[in-house]
Image (tube, rainbow, N blue to C red):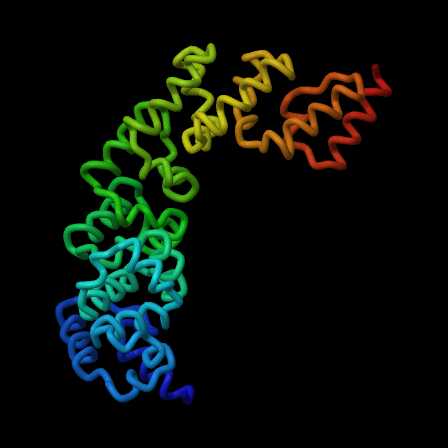
Amino acid sequence: MSAAAATALQSSLCISSQKPSFSPSNSQETNTLSAAKPKSLLHKHPLYTSTHQNLSLQIKEKILCLEIMGIDSGKVLSLNPSLHTTSLDSLHSIISFLQSKGIHQKDFPRIFGMCPKILTSNTKTDLNPVFSFLSQDLNVPENNYRKVINKCPRLLTSSVRDQLKPALFYLQRLGFKDLEALAYHDPVLLVSSVEHTLIPKLKFLESIGFSTNEAKGMVLRCPGLFTFSIENNYKPKFEYYKQEMKGKLEELKEFPQFFAFSLDKRIKPRHMEVMQSGVKLPLANILKTTDEEFKELLRQAAVNS
């Protein structure tokens, strides 16, 4: 297929190379483009002709549309069965809307791959409220929508009323005052369940000996603590820290980032080197230093001991 033909095919489906303005007049123009779709060009495309002959025309067109955008059609159709009955016009509407909010075409494979549900969402009742939340509740300017969405595509599948606002309210009550940090660095906290994710992590820290205020201080210093698994992260690492490293809660309170390091690849090897050297080093120095810095600290500690 020639470059000109490929461009014509791309623009005739559900992708626009330019950022559209989402308005009634633009929607009419979009429908006109869809109605004027060059069928012969579509039918000759390799992806179209290689699809199963028993598939309907609508499904073939949809598969081609997704694949041209770089999206694994088999994966998204499997994860979101509702996509089978969604029209191409509906897909075009969603894509045009996201582009109007600054999302680039090259972002779609990752965004839709992670959250296929977006492809069957309603721009007015599902997507638009999320962007209003970003603007009004997190003070994110329009030109930074893309940065936030790419950081956490799940925002687009989250209910503002039932998920995003309750999570923001809870986090602010804990002491998270930096809205910019929440938006650009830790938006995953906003899509985390307060009842099933955030509160249990805080309760676990309290269960191993920290006061409520100490636990709050730890998650404020290291928000990533809210994203770690209790069974696969907290418990094995704390058990090793307590039993093998003979660590104290006070040092862990000052360096909660301990839980962010790999137990097998970082914590255990570094601890073993410290033990073999017969020296003592602060927990932070053991884990956050580079290999060169760590070896130098061991050397200096051995000289001064």
Horizontally, residue 191 falls left or right of residue 247, namely left
**Residue located at (37% from left, 29% from top):** 176
In the picture as drawn, the residue positioned furthest to the front comes out as 54
As drawn, 190 above or below 246:
below
Q: Nearer the viewer, residue 71 or 11?
A: 71
In the picture as drawn, the residue positioned furthest to the right comes out as 303
As drawn, 31 above or below 213:
below
Residue 257, located in which quarter of the rendered image?
top right
Q: Position of residue 17 (x, y in %)?
A: 34, 74
Q: Which quadrant of the rendered structure holds the N terminus?
A: bottom left
**Residue located at (37% from left, 41% from top):** 187
Residue 93, located in which quarter of the rendered image?
bottom left
Q: Position of residue 116 (x, y in %)?
A: 30, 55
**Residue located at (37% from left, 47% from top):** 152
**Residue located at (32% from left, 58% from top):** 76
Q: Position of residue 22 (x, y in %)?
A: 20, 65
As drawn, 79 above or below 15:
above
Q: Which quadrant of the rendered structure holds the C terminus?
A: top right
Q: Position of residue 255 (x, y in %)?
A: 56, 23
Disc tally is 0
Residue 29, located in which quarter of the rendered image?
bottom left
